[in-house]
Amino acid sequence: MRHRGVAAAGVLAVVSLAGCSASVSKPDGDDVAAAVSAEAEASASAVAGEVGRAGAGMVALSPEGLEAVALADGQAVAGGTVTAQVSDRDFPNAGTVVAKKAVCTPLATVQAGSVLGAPVSVVRRMWIGPQETSEADLGADPSDGEVAAAALDATTSFVSLASYGQEAAAKVVMAGIGRAVRECAAGGFVYTVAGQDPVKTVKVQKTAAPAGTGGADEVIAANLTVSVDGVSGPVRVVVVREGGTVGYFPATNLASQATGDAFTLPAALVQAQLAQLTEAG
């Protein structure tokens, strides 16, 4: 499970949910990464600063407190399995994700599998869904390529719980993400992770909150489309807030990244984590 979790984590961090080994062509020329403006970096710092100011004097959930409300290692949810065998080292540090269009940095940060601002504590999980392509779907004599593709046809979500303490700090985070969803819908955005090759998100579409999440203080959901080597693949993003804690749910399906076909982030996954968070509160 550790191997599968880290592999999926690499998808989130290295190509930001765009595929295992694909390299993203620089959409604005070879100097896109260098062209990421100081304004964008300042925007990322400003978000962190706003979160810090809003959370001054807060009483945040400790790592132990977050562990107590997080989905458990090995827990069966939505037909898949949760693993805690992931590490902060597998994912971008907060602040290393920078969008060329500054307002889009919060959404790019979520897409890349990181968290916003400067939370007091963070707990991470990986949810690995069931294989969607069955043996019956493959037929009697599938090729090696078909078998390999079927093995990749499973949705994966990296779940992060971040405690900011006071509601005001968590609201700043949600406001930044919400603004990015609204203002980055036209034309998408380009971003880098730690100065590496740029990632091109060509489409942002706000969607309805997952079923059964209406009890959360705030929910933001969006479908993103990432372009890799001429193939456009979907990414799903859901972010929920309960008090001073924010839950991040970016998701990918490697088969969908290769084909461009749609996939679903199960509402039951978000419901399960939200239920444990609200019960503890």
Image (tube, rainbow, N blue to C red):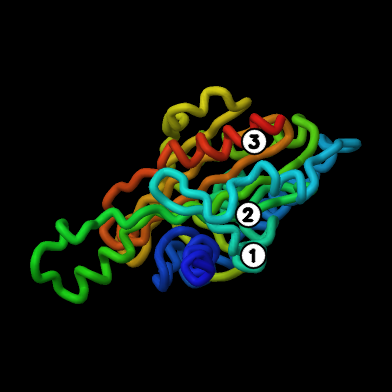
Mark 2: few/some/many CA within 10 Å (<14, 14-19, 20+): many
Numbered circles on residues, count: 3
Disc sitting over residue 37 in the figure:
none
Q: Nearer the viewer, residue 89 or 118?
A: 89
Q: Is residue 23 above or below residue 174?
A: below
Foreground disc of the pair 3, 2: 3
Give the residue drawn at x 77%, y 49%. Answer: 64
Residue 66 location, quadrant: top right
Residue 175 appears in the rendering: no
Q: Which type of secondary structure does the marked residue at label 3 adopt? A: helix
Distance, label 3 to label 2, CA atoms, is: 14 Å
Q: Which residue corresponds to mark 2? A: 124
Foreground disc of the pair 3, 1: 3
Residue 168 appears in the rendering: yes
Distance, label 3 to label 1, CA atoms, is: 21 Å
Q: Earlier in the sequence, mark 1 or mark 2?
A: 1
- Amino acid type at circle 3 is Leu
In the picture as drawn, the residue positioned furthest to the right comes out as 57
Q: Earlier in the sequence, mark 3 or mark 2?
A: 2
Give the residue drawn at x 33%, y 64%. Answer: 152
Q: Which type of secondary structure does the marked residue at label 2 adopt? A: strand
Q: Which residue corresponds to mark 1? A: 87
